[in-house]
Amino acid sequence: MNMNAQPRSIEQAWGWLKRSNQPDAAVSTDDLAIVDTEISPLRPGRIKYQATYWFGKCEQNVRLPAGSYVRVLRREGNAWVVQALSG
């Protein structure tokens, strides 16, 4: 996006601001969130993603404790589907 061009949507503006403030474009945190309330295989929890709290659920058979970082895969209704970070 041109620095002088107006963003067409809030999503474009948010993405542009996040990219412009990152020192290394290869290291992106656009798809990372932090677990606020534990997520377990049968129970959704809460995540903080892009400065907002959302419901989060995981399709993997794992427990995601509060304070852990997760990768955001997609949105389903008012919840985000996340996965544990490997490593």
Image (cartoon, rainbow, N blue to C red):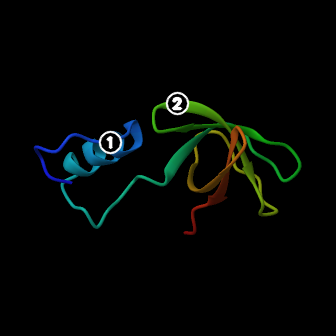
**The residue under label 1 is which amino acid type?**
Arg
**Marks 2 and 1: in contact by CB < 8 Å?**
no
- Residue 44, compared with residue 69, is above or below; it is above
Instruction: Give the quadrant of residue 72.
Output: bottom right
Relative to the observer, which residue lies in front, 9 or 19?
Answer: 9
Relative to the observer, which residue lies in front, 76 or 26?
Answer: 76
Identified at 27% across, 47% down, the residue is 16
Looking at the image, the residue that sits furthest to the left is: 4
Q: Distance between the residues labelled 1 and 2?
A: 21 Å
Please tell me the numbered disc located at residue 18. none
Please tell me the numbered disc located at residue 52. 2
Instruction: Report the residue marked by disc 1.
Output: 8
Percent position of residue 10, x then y: 38, 36
Q: In which quarter of the image is the C terminus?
A: bottom right
Percent position of residue 46, x then y: 68, 35
Total marks shown come to: 2
Instruction: Give the quadrant of residue 65.
Output: top right
Percent position of residue 29, x then y: 40, 53
